[in-house]
Image (cartoon, helix red, strand yellow):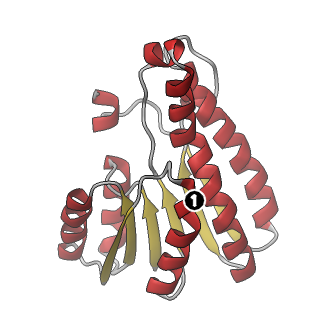
Amino acid sequence: MRMMIVGATSAIAHETAKCFAKDGAEFFLVARSPQKLADIGNDLKVRGAQRIETYVLDVTELERHQEMIETAITTLDGLDMVLIAHGTLGDQQKCQRSVAETLKEFTTNCTSVISLLTILADYFEQQKRGCITVISSVAGDRGRQSNYVYGAAKGALSVFLQGLRNRLSKSGVAVVTVKPGLIDTPMTAA
């Protein structure tokens, strides 16, 4: 199994990767922190991962997505599965006072994911197999006063994934939307 994980340093991504590592998966791990990537890579290697490659990227740098994906495909000699798990639970009050903050949160939680998915969809459609899994959120199912910027981003992402799932199903590619509720992770503790 050749797997790319974007947002590989998130708690959910790391726990998921552990499950695949024990079966000898090969990983292309993407995140902002080189040190955290190295730590997670070392942990996965101990757990049985056959190969670990890392790539440092801030997902809001949309212009770097194509190069990163091409590097992953070349480095692992193809991809079988992708997990997109990055995101931030921004400060709703800051977003309410700042258009820039709102757009930053929307870019991180939605636009960056759509950018990655648009590139990956063509690759997997031509390959005619594989799985794309994306972490969304139940926050996108209903607008709440306490987190509607985050919820709007996740809602838009979930609708995009519905359409992408319909498109790629004809090619034998699975598109999976994961919507965890509130769980205890460093993101929700912040």
Query: Which quadrant of the structure image shows residue 119?
Result: bottom right
- Measuring 47% from the left and 32% from the top, which residue is drawn there? 181
Residue highlighted by disc 1: 63
Residue at position x 44%, y 17% from top?
Answer: 94
Which quadrant of the structure image shows residue 183? top left
Q: From this viewpoint, which residue is outermost toward the bottom?
A: 77
User: Residue 62: x and y, percent?
Assistant: 56, 54
Give x and y (percent) for residue 32.
34, 54
Q: Foreground: 175 or 54? A: 54
Q: How many marks?
A: 1
12 relative to 119 in the view: left or right: left
Task: Give the amino acid type for the residue marked by disc 1 in the picture.
Answer: Glu
Residue 68 to residue 71: above or below: above
Q: Secondary structure at mark 1?
A: helix
Figure quadrant of residue 33: bottom left
Would you place residue 146 above or below residue 54 in this image?
above
Q: Residue at x 43, y 27 (%)?
A: 90
Q: Is residue 185 visible?
A: no
In the image, residue 190 lies at what x, y percent? Answer: 29, 27
Q: Looking at the image, is 123 positioned above or below residue 85?
A: below
Structural crowding at the residue carrying mark 1, measured as other residues with C-alpha within 10 Å and reported as few (<14), some (14–19) or many (≥20): few
Query: Residue 182: x and y, percent?
Result: 41, 29
The vertical placement of 110 against 56, above or below, is: above
Q: Residue at x 18, y 63 (%)?
A: 39
- Left/right placement of residue 93 relative to residue 175 reads left
**Looking at the image, which is closer to me, 72 or 172?**
72
Q: Can residue 141 be seen?
A: yes
Left or right, residue 35 beside residue 103: left
